[in-house]
Amino acid sequence: MKRKLLSFVSVVIAMLTLASVSLIPASAINYTNGIKLKSKSALVINMDTGQTVFSVKAKEKRYPASTTKIMTYIVVAENVDDFENTKVKIKKDVLSILDGTGSSVANVEAHVGEKMSVLDLLYSMMVPSGNDAAVVLADYIGKGDINAFVEMMNAKAKELGCKNTHFANPDGLHDKNHYTTAEDLAKITQYALTLPEFSTITNTATYYVKDDDNPLVTTNYMIDENRGGDYYYQYAQGIKTGTTDEAGHCLVTMGSADGYTYLAVLLMNPIKDPDEYGTMIDAADLFRWALTKLELNQVASSETPVCEVKVNLAWGKDSVQLVPERNINAIVPTDYNKNDIIIETDVPQSVDASIKKGDVIGKATVYYKGDQAKGKQKIDTVNLVSSETIERSGILHIASVIKNIVSSGWFLLVIAAIIVLLIAYIIISVMIKKRNRNRRKHVRKYRNF
């Protein structure tokens, strides 16, 4: 029951998170920035609005390496009520499945035969990227069956709307059937950020497991001021690194400053130098660009008319101006101008009064003009509504009804039938009169004899 409650609460939190940005509809615009990426796939999303601002091969399947553990965290979090007080026995046979894999570990083996809290195991999994902690947690949640845990991962991915994701393990070790995309991984991460302790754990540079003397140290140099060196970026927050020969360097992280937060997903930075992390360089460059060159602006106002439509049956009023049903805000370049915004309308040629202020008359699609290479990019679609109330004229309405009746096919058919009958009546009347005259003439002639 408690697990179901936690799952329900997580869903509610996710819905509230989405609702908080619903006034600024999510869209996907790939702005030009001139950054020469080292990663093959990249995606940058403004977390305040849900709007994608940069995308490179974000739908292409990639090996995720240890960024897999974000989904592992999700499944664990939805099946454990109390991280700190839930204890997991560390079993040697579970850890042995990693033998010979060259896995990154977090010293979980030192606790074989003992119990560790789920909280310590989550830190061990997410901070130093311990595969040992990942398999222990998967074995625990899967009730001794890691494959059952993996099935839960795939079910959750499907639930989150991931269309090109499939997991084969909880740790991210290479498997040809273990893949995702930058777009799917962003969905997974956005959901994970709504779960208990996720943000805290993934933004921790140093952590001490209970009874351990040596600290767990993050693999994400962007958040480690002491060890990060040139990779340290003061505005970075979390989230997860990943590396295998096949996946290259991978990174999911956030950058936040001046009231703006961006999520960056970077996959497949080929490993040319094991000590060079191109994903972290890419992330810092993208954050600097997004945080200094983009801003939230109102691109369409509910007070500004977009077009007008002819109005029928109104006395002294032949048209009505249409305005957006709501304001449209979007993340746009700081140097954008009004000419960069294109509004295309879909409205009828005319409407009949009466019309109330706020009545939906048509729709408008708002685009960002962009450059010649990318062309216009959709920002949002919005209803167009009447800017005023226009009453119907009774006289014009009656005249219109009469006109419609007179011009209708059935009316013309009836009139034609009446005319035909009238002509027929006249012809028959003439014929009858003529016959009667002839008969009278014949009678007079006969009498003369």
Image (cartoon, rainbow, N blue to C red):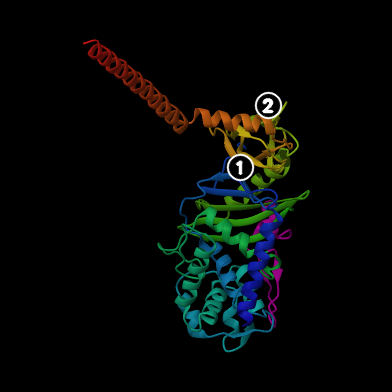
In which quarter of the view is residue 73 placed? Answer: bottom right
Label 1 Cα crowd, 10 Å radius (few <14 / some 14-19 / many 20+): some
Looking at the image, residue 307 lies above or below residue 211:
above
In percent of width and height, residue 349 lies at: 58, 30
SS assignment at label 2: loop
Residue located at (48% from left, 75% from top): 98
Front residue of 342/126: it is 342
Residue located at (45% from left, 33% from top): 410
Q: Which residue is labeled 2 in the image?
A: 318
Label 2 Cα crowd, 10 Å radius (few <14 / some 14-19 / many 20+): some
Q: Is residue 228 magenta?
A: yes
What's the magenta region? Answer: 203-232
* Gap in angstroms between the C-alphas marked 2 and 1: 27 Å
Q: Quadrant of the N terminus?
A: bottom right
In this view of the protein, can residue 198 be seen by the observer? yes
Q: Which residue is labeled 1 in the image?
A: 381
Horizontal relation, residue 291 to residue 377: left or right:
right
Amino acid type assigned to the residue bearing label 2 in the image: Asp
